Image (cartoon, rainbow, N blue to C red):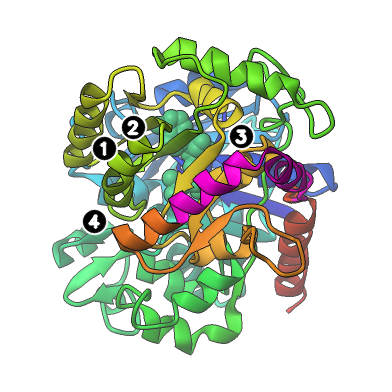
Amino acid sequence: MRILFVTTEVYPLVKTGGLADVAGALSAALAESGEDVRLLLPAYPQAVRALRHWRPIGEGEVLGWRIHLIEGCMPDSGVPVLLVVCPLLFERLGNPYSASTGCEWPDNHERFAVLSRVAASIAVGEWGEKGSVRGWKGEGWRADVVHANDWQTGLVPVYLKLWENTRGRKGPASVFTIHNLAFHGQFPSYVMRRLGLPLDMFSVNGLEFYGNVSYLKAGLYYSDSITTVSPTYAHEIQTDQAGHGLQGLLLARAKTLVGILNGEDNRVWNPAADPSIHHPFTDRQMSGKALDKMALQRELGLHVSATAPLFGVISRLTEQKGVDLVMGAVSDIMVRDGQLVILGAGDRRFEVACMAAAESYPGRIAVRIGLDEALAHRIQAGSDVLLMPSRFEPCGLSQMYAMRYGTLPVVRRTGGLADTVVDVNDPDDRGTGFLFDAATVPAFLAVVHRAFDLYRNRAAWRSIQRRAMRQDFSWRRSAERYRQLYRELVQK
Ligand code: ADP
């Protein structure tokens, strides 16, 4: 099958969160099983720098913008990549969505409409309105399936539908994956004029959402199939509590909505062969983990102590991730002689609160604000416990990485966290971490104290660590489910 995977980030070209990991690992797994998969994303400068063997393959005009396409391949998996070059839209400092100040780019509606429009044109084999893809070895390539991800690519199924309506025949099948329903990509109705779409698509049965244009709703409404990243989240988003106003549409489309758990990329997250950590280890030979803990303490200026339980947080610092709950637990962690390491970036108020905590407890709390992939690996390797008290969590990857590195996760029972972590009190002895329910400081404190208590029982802790490290979260199974879904759609 020919699959066009449209994304706004992919590890290791460009990453702000879990979507990048998923795009990198899933495309590699699909290619490995023999599928003709190609990634498409904007040509951010860092993506161009990291791309291998790239060359320009054509140009064209899309929504009034002069666009160049370049083709190359992923530095790790070798999966073919197409980058959409449009310097005015994509060559900026900051991350794919916002400036370094944290403010979203004001023309995001334009940037991601262009990406989506290019994606649809490539998928149907008609790239560019006025240009062509001369000299492209993929000339004539068209997709059987287009896989779009999150609101930034929500217009892809819309442009495909438009193509079908004007040609009177079926185009490629479309899959739309929700990685986080909280981000809608909502814009004032006047942006409709920029999208090259019939204005009657701006309706309840279309892109309209409470008077605005919603790119997320567009993806949900027009795609042939909707997936999300865990079975529990698939269920939760059909309820008033977690539906973000889209539960009605999701309920109506329940037959085409499926939750497929993300996997972990064990090429990247493997404590036995991780170039970012100092001392490799395995579930049979754990001495490296103790050394990694000491190395991390030294690196971050914490007191070096083998016995102080070390709690790690690697996260966007937002309300979703329960950073306020972590802040509420600081004094208890300190009273019980624990240590805390936080790596993250996000809401300014949480960044400030974290830095203030570090100042209050020098040598016992370390905070690093920003994105640091290698440090994230060292924190996973050196910590005893990973704190992830998310209010909601579509899937979550950090808890899976934690388990792989023998770091027991403390998570709230929600979304993918509930699907991947089993509480240590499990009667059938399947425990791999700690779960709690209410998103309140007292409930979180109770579970943190349970972690402290169990930590003192070294034999029990060690055996749960081993069990956690042996969990199979590989992409093999999940990639197979996507392939099956693609096949069903293509055969329809
Ligand atoms: P998200 O909702 O942010 O996608 P996930 O748990 O699904 O959450 O994925 C988070 C990914 O981002 C993991 O690979 C994690 O290691 C990484 N990550 C989060 N914050 C940072 C950071 N500050 N520096 C480096 N990596 C980070």
Q: In the image, is 41 to the left or to the right of 344? A: right
Q: Which mark is residue 194?
A: 4
Where is residue 299 shown, x and y percent of the image?
A: 46, 11
Q: Quadrant of residue 457?
A: top right
Contact, mark 4 vs mark 1 (Cβ under 8 Å): no
192 over 263 or under it: above or below: below
Foreground pick, 356 / 236: 356
Type of amino acid under label 3: Val
Type of amino acid under label 1: Ser
Which residue, given by chain and number where applicable, does mark 2 sit on?
95
Q: Quadrant of residue 327?
A: top left
Where is residue 280 shown, x and y percent of the image?
A: 73, 19
Question: What distance separates the C-alpha of mark 4 from that of mark 2?
Answer: 24 Å
Question: What distance separates the C-alpha of mark 4 from that of mark 1?
Answer: 21 Å
Type of amino acid under label 4: Arg
Which residue, given by chain and number where applicable, does mark 3 sit on?
81
Question: What distance separates the C-alpha of mark 3 from that of mark 1?
Answer: 23 Å
Contact, mark 3 vs mark 1 (Cβ under 8 Å): no
In front: label 3 or label 1: 1
SS at badge 3? strand
Q: Which mark is residue 98?
A: 1
In front: label 4 or label 3: 3
Mark 1 within 8 Å of ligand 1, using the beta carbon: no
| Mark 2 crowd level (few <14, some 14–19, many ≥20, 10 Å Cα) | some
Contact, mark 2 vs mark 1 (Cβ under 8 Å): yes
